Image (cartoon, grey):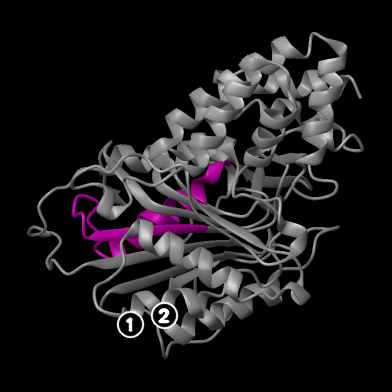
Amino acid sequence: MAATGARPSGGGPDYPGVEPRWTVMIFMGAATIAGNAPLIDAAEADLAEMQFVGSGDRLNIFVQVHQGKDVVPRRGQIKEHGAVGINGLGPVPDGETETRGGAALGKFIQWALASAKHNPNNPEHYSMLVLWGHAYDFAIGREPTTDGMIDALDFAELSRVLERLQLEFGTGAKLDILGFDACDLATVEMAYQLGPFAKYLIGSQIGVPLPGWPYNEILDRLRTPFGRLMGGAEFASYVVRRFCQCYGAESGTVSLTALDLNRAQELKATADVLAETLIEAIRDPAARDQIGALFNASQTAPGKPFVDVADLCLGLMRESDDPLVIEAARALGDLLISPRPPAVGVSAVGGGTPVVVEHGRNAAQTARLNGISIYAPNVAPERDFESVRHLYNNFVFAQETQWSDLVHALASQR
């Protein structure tokens, strides 16, 4: 975590040293779940990539791996010449293994920050948390429990974990980057949910192929920087570029995005205005059919209940006859793409960025992706949207805007 304000450098007596440095924490949900691709081999491959880099003077890498209810989770600091693979990590202490409610994640973050002597009030101490694993139905890190059920970290629980840590470190303390090595999480809902706890979010609008992020390529720039060490905005952009460069079109479609969460409030307010205007517009059956067709045209991938926000806005601007819809769509689209005016002393570290700081893609199939999605169950009628509606409504965005009412009204007309 790092403080939001520009405080003087210097760690103080409890945190000696003032050199810029990064604490990178990767929390891996690698349990085998029926119907999902096995993750153990991918976890081992990523750990090998991390070990190729290893921790150094300016970089501390910490990992925790959960393999399921019958296997003790393991964690440790990744060192360049340390023990190899999951079994080379030490067991998580008793009392810190419970995954329900995100308890294990919270303990892991506390342990990693303490081990790194990370000072959240030092603006030159940067932090990145990566959540790794299968994600769907608005949760990540699915793991069987002793009673035969499936436990997963939903994003309301994730918010509570980060809120408790923020209370410990100070309300101004935020992660510099919160990343998801998982599918379909570069969304408006996630940006607003996590805006209070992180400065930048890295996620994909579509699926992430195994083994996921190229950790050796990404982390090496922190271990051996060219000149000065990158800050949060620069490193988030670098992760996106390196990821997309590592996957050619022949390897399958990929996309990755860095989002500026400092603009999450603006994003929520502007999306809500569009929802309000569309709810009014779909009272007209002809307009409802047209709007539904534009949603379908902006679907992120076949079978996925998400649309690309900027593409949807462009379609509405071009096809709608309603001036209120056109203006609301233009405002939201511009917010995603247009940078803020330069701010003295801020823009140099990313303060002037648009919501979509960096977006990468690798194939013609991804040409309509622009970096951020939003939930739209009406574009995937084969899915049972009613069974997960209560989970979607756990998002703060769904509670504070009319978007849920809009998309479920469209879905109910299918």
In the displayed structure, 359 sits above or below 193; it is below
Q: Residue 224, which numbered label?
A: 1
Q: Bounds of the magenta span?
A: 101-130
The answer to whether residue 251 is left or right of residue 82 is: right
Query: CA separation, marks 1 and 2?
Result: 6 Å
Q: Say what amino acid the circle numbered 2 marks.
A: Asp
In the displayed structure, 338 sits above or below 221; it is above
Q: Residue 17, which numbered label?
A: none
Residue 401, position as x, y percentages in the image: 58, 19
**At numbered mark 1, what does the secondary structure look like: helix, strand or loop?**
loop
Q: Which residue lies furthest to the left in this view?
A: 13
Q: Magenta span has 129?
A: yes
Q: Residues within 10 Å of mark 1 (few under 14, many from 20)?
A: some
User: Which quadrant would residue 127 be assigned to in this image?
Assistant: bottom left
Image quarter where the C terminus lies is top right
Q: Which residue is drawn at 70% across and 54% down?
A: 206
